[in-house]
Amino acid sequence: MSAFRPKFATITTWMLLSGISRRNTYEHLRRGNLKGHKVGSRTLIDVDHGLAWIESHPGPSTWRPDAVRDPTAEGAGRAQPDRSALAA
């Protein structure tokens, strides 16, 4: 038996269904990535469209660990001042 999935969801319900924060939900609505409908003072998200949009994006399997800078590598972090002149 499959879980119930509403056709439209409030912002709070959408956040629970999708894992997208309130701020990012409104940003994606503004960009047109999500379809929203105003009903009185509520904004309802088209759940089928929103989940299809999420699924159209590559998942975490495309993450490349070699593309991340190693924080322990030489020269990583903030630049250190040249203190050789102070040692003399």
Image (cartoon, grey):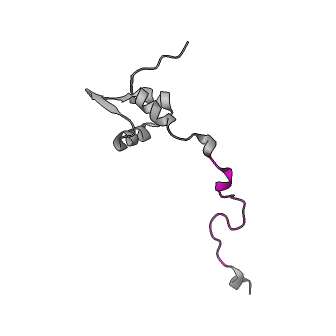
Work out which residue is located at the far left of the displayed protein and give it.
Answer: 40
Q: Is residue 84 left or right of residue 1?
A: right
Residue furthest bottom in the image: 88
Foreground pick, 78 / 61: 61
The furthest residue to the top: 1
Q: Residue at x 52, y 17 (%)?
A: 3
The stretch of residues the image draws in magenta is: 63-82
Q: Is residue 53 among the parts visible in the rendering?
A: yes
Q: Quadrant of residue 45?
A: top left
Q: Quadrant of residue 37?
A: top left
Which quadrant: the N terminus? top right
Q: Say whether residue 88 is left or right of residue 60.
A: right
- Asked if residue 75 is positioned above or below residue 70 in the image, the reply reads below
Q: Answer with the quarter of the image where residue 46 lies.
A: top left
Q: Is residue 79 above or below residue 44?
A: below
Q: Magenta region's main secondary structure?
A: loop
Residue at x-position 60% and y-position 41%? 60
- Look at 69% across and 79% down and name the residue there: 83
